[in-house]
Amino acid sequence: MMKQSLISSAILTALFSSNVLAADIKGKVLDQNNQLVSGAKVHLHGKSQSVTTDKSGQFTINVDADSQLHITKNNYLDARLDVTTNNGYVTVTLKPSSVESIVVYASALHKNNVEMASPVTVLAGDELKNAAKPTLGETLKGQPGINSSYFGPVSSSPIIRGLDGPRVKITQNGLDSSDASRVGPDHANTNESLSAQQIEVLRGPATLLYGSGAIGGVVNVVDNRIPTDIIESLSGAAEYSHDTVSNTNTYAAVLEAGHEGFNFHFDGVSRKGGDYETPQFNLPHDEHGEDDHHDDHDDHDDHGSEADHDDHHEEAPETANKVDNTYIDSQQVNFGTSYVNDHLTLGLAFGRIETDYGIPAHSHEDHDHGHDDHDDHDDHDSDAHDDHDDHADEHTEEAVYARVKQDRWQALFNYSLHNQWIESINVRAGYTDYEHSEIEHGAIGTTFKNKTTELRTGVEHRIGEWHGIIGYHYSDSDYEAQGAEAFTPATETKSHALFLLEERTFGDFTLELGARIEDFQLSSLVTNESHHDDDHDDHGHDDHDDHGHDDHDDHGHDDHDDHGEFETIAYELDMTNFSASIGGVYNFAEGHNFSVNLSRSERAPLTAELLSNGTHIATGTYELGLGYEIEEGEIHFEPQTIEQETATNIDFSVRRFMGDFGYTVNVFYNDIANYYYQQNTGLMYTAEHGLEEADHFHEGASPVFKFVSNDAELYGIELDAHYRINDKNRVKVFADSLTAKLDNDQYLPRIPSNKFGVKYEFEHAGWKANMTITRYNSQSNITSYETQTNGYTLIDTSLRYDFEAQGIDFVGYANIDNLTDELGFVHSSFIKDQAPLPGRNLKLGLRAYF
């Protein structure tokens, strides 16, 4: 008993050490000219909360053990200072940085963007507010190595180094967004850029902390819905803006308050706008009454080059200067509360999103494709969407809009121990209830639902000279789809994972090691079909009702019950994914470093890649997953041994981040074994006739694309350079280049165009102005079913003025996007011909801080 008591006492002493030695440390932060720095963030290593220097550059922070202060401020290098409880007053001097240095929450080890072994981009502060768009893809697409899938401006997901969808994990405060944006490009993600504090993009595999869905990278949206600092007063901000290109009005607000460690947070965004205008462009065939509306996949000679239309039609092509059915009506609110003291942070948050948005180029084979009624869209403005069921009826029958609802709960527990081994214990948990309905003729045509439970826990520790985190990650996603576009069956996906990340410093070199082992389980009910010999004309497609395609009877399947026999298979996929990385950062001179990171990451196929079997209306194709085979004109579920997609990625980065001139150059090579992609089978599909050869298909047929696997390689370079001419003028240059091929030398589909840009910034006496010129090159590296996309140049400008009135800080701004009204087509878009980029847009806004 005495031995057990001694052990228990030792454990309790380690976990809950007394703070009788606690003391307040005061200090000030200076710049290189000994001028006081206000707004610098002072964080005590091992704790979740921080303090901010006041207008006099002063701060006070509680320290209860020997520790380290981490001081950060935009445009300055991070500073770290070892402190003890005996320190009474400290002075910290920050050195200027030519590259903005920001702590990356997704790194898990309090590292900033210039310290990480793997490349990272962070948008924060005013830069983020000015760049904020309705979707993450459009917000981030100007960054090197990042592009947008672009299914119109209201549905656009990030593409990182040519990878998107199931290979890019999108998270909110480190937890999965849990929407359906990875199922189809017309499904918008549910992350709001305007309410975020910062958005972090981790390039390359980031599977160690975030799972196999992050084999291509991570986009982490950080907000303060659960406050982690002690808030001692009432503060907030409000913003209004208006976009002329779509007559969109946006309202945003944030409010925070606190008392004796108890904090409250609220933020909300409301956005309402109409269809967006474009420079005049030629409508593709299906947009003005032509029957051949599948050129998007099989006959792309007209993509990105309107002049080619004259070769295909004797009459002049019909034109448009607006993309129909691209309106948005969105509301989002987040409420959060927390309790924070010297050791503990405990918080809970709830968020709700309700969004209606039009889906461009979304049509059904039985609908009227005439263009005569499209002029009704001219009357769309921000007041036209109060009742979207009535709104849809005002358009052609093919107009479809999405209604998205999401409830999201998040919880946070963090306990800082400050003993010799364990620094902190962190637990994040989330529950998301997501529903995406597509409204046709005023009724719900298809509904996608996803309920996700997620838990992530980590223990930050120091063992000898090693500093790291060990953790457990659990996720359970219950997905189902019902309706005409339900081309995937209901599926439950679970994963359990253990991960470890460690670092150690050897002089000027920091070594990073990481590993993750993940048990991935996917279960679903799949319907297989066999046919009698004399019934092959129906081509094996009468099983779709059992796939959750409740209304496929309306598409010609009501007479198939007499033609085949069905069996329902309880299918399960169980894989163990292992990922590991080794990397390092070498500070070879003051303000310079070189980093290298080698990683190997595995992932299993997701539902759409594995079990798709149906018409995907958004892309105009009939999709088949890896588990299906086509035999003698029939589709059979015959899952073979499916191997993990395995990426071996190496990154090299060189950075200069001190002084007036700075740069970051990233070079990467990604070798992916068993890369999952869609291959054109050369067959066509109709509900009435099933599979047909492409040379004699019936009207309204969709090309059949099947997921297959093959080895692929992606490699490229990214550049981001800054030069501070003087206190008023600064120039930035950025560029990226990507090559993506299969091992047979065929290019992957929809490879983003290379881009090159120059940005000039001017600042004086409260005025800030900038101009950005970005050249998107033509894309001729295409697959057999694509055509070249012409290049284009975008010029964006902005002007802002900071002023104070009645004790409130204001920012007034005017942005002009696409100043020259350039016509641009996005090669990475599924609907590039139907939805060019917006034309000239004037955005006026006012932001207030109190």
Image (tube, rainbow, N blue to C red):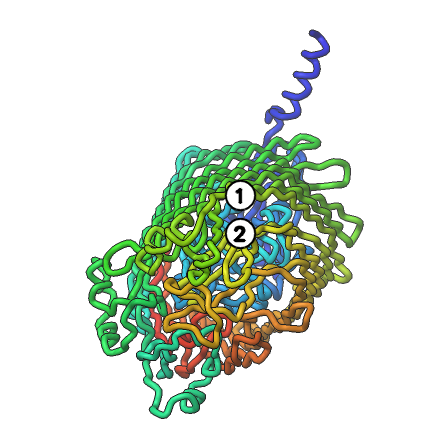
Residue 445 figure quarter: bottom left
Q: Give the labeled residue for mark 1.
A: 571
Compare residues 201 and 355 and report the one nearer the observer.
Answer: 355
Residue 145 figure quarter: bottom right
Residue 384: tell me if it is visible. yes
Question: Do the numbered discs 2 and 1 sit on residues whose CB atoms are within 8 Å?
Answer: yes
Residue 817: tell me if it is visible. no
Q: Give the labeled residue for mark 2.
A: 637
Residue 36 place in picture, x, y as percent: 55, 55
In the orientation shown, which residue stands out farthest toward the top? Answer: 1
Compare residues 317 and 625 and report the one nearer the observer.
Answer: 625
Compare residues 684 and 247 and report the one nearer the observer.
Answer: 684
Residue 193 place in picture, x, y as percent: 43, 57
Task: Report the residue at 23% width, 68% height from top.
Answer: 395
Three-letter amino acid code at the position of disc 2: Phe
Residue 10 place in picture, x, y as percent: 68, 19
Task: Report the residue at 37% width, 63% height from top.
Answer: 688
Residue 138 place in picture, x, y as percent: 45, 66
Q: Residue 841 has which mark?
A: none
Three-letter amino acid code at the position of disc 1: Tyr
Decide: is 727 above or below 460: below
Q: Quadrant of the N terminus?
A: top right
In the orientation shown, which residue stands out farthest toward the front? Answer: 534
Task: Report the residue at 49% width, 52% height from top.
Answer: 530
In the orientation shown, which residue stands out farthest toward the bottom? Answer: 314
Task: Report the residue at 45% width, 63% height from top.
Answer: 622
Q: Residues within 10 Å of mark 1 (few under 14, many from 20)?
A: some
For the residues carrying marks 2 and 1, which lies nearer the camera in this image? Answer: 2
Instruction: Label 2: state its secondary structure.
Output: strand
